[in-house]
Image (cartoon, rainbow, N blue to C red):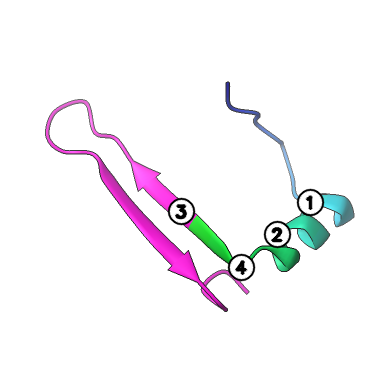
Amino acid sequence: MAHFYPELTPELKLFIQEQKIFFTARAPTQGRINLSPKGIDSFR
């Protein structure tokens, strides 16, 4: 089950910085699900 956070805490920021790859996704009510890998400095 997903966890939702109201803001990025220092601990979450550190966790994110240490990751080598992320996946972003969106799921519209109709159509295809889009899941994309992102890596290196995509979110920094």
Image marks 1 and 3: residues in contact by CB distance under 8 Å: no
> Residue 43's x, y, as percent?
57, 69
Looking at marks 2 and 3 on the same chain, the residue that comes earlier in the sequence is marked by 2
* For discs 4 and 1, the disc positioned in front in the rendered view: 4
Is residue 40 rendered magenta in the image?
yes
The type of residue carrying mark 4 is Lys
Image marks 4 and 2: residues in contact by CB distance under 8 Å: no
**Where are the magenta residues, as a range?**
23-44
The type of residue carrying mark 2 is Ile
- SS under mark 3: strand
Q: Residue at x 46, y 53 (%)?
A: 23
Looking at marks 4 and 1 on the same chain, the residue that comes earlier in the sequence is marked by 1
Residue at the far front: name it.
Answer: 20
Mark 3 surroundings: few (<14), some (14-19) or many (≥20) residues within 10 A: few
Looking at marks 1 and 3 on the same chain, the residue that comes earlier in the sequence is marked by 1
Give the distance between the C-alpha atoms of the residues marked 4 and 3, in whole angstroms. 11 Å
Residue, disc 1: 12
Residue, disc 3: 23
Residue, disc 4: 20
Mark 2 surroundings: few (<14), some (14-19) or many (≥20) residues within 10 A: some
Q: Residue at x 73, y 67 (%)?
A: 17
Quick check: 36 left or right of 16? left
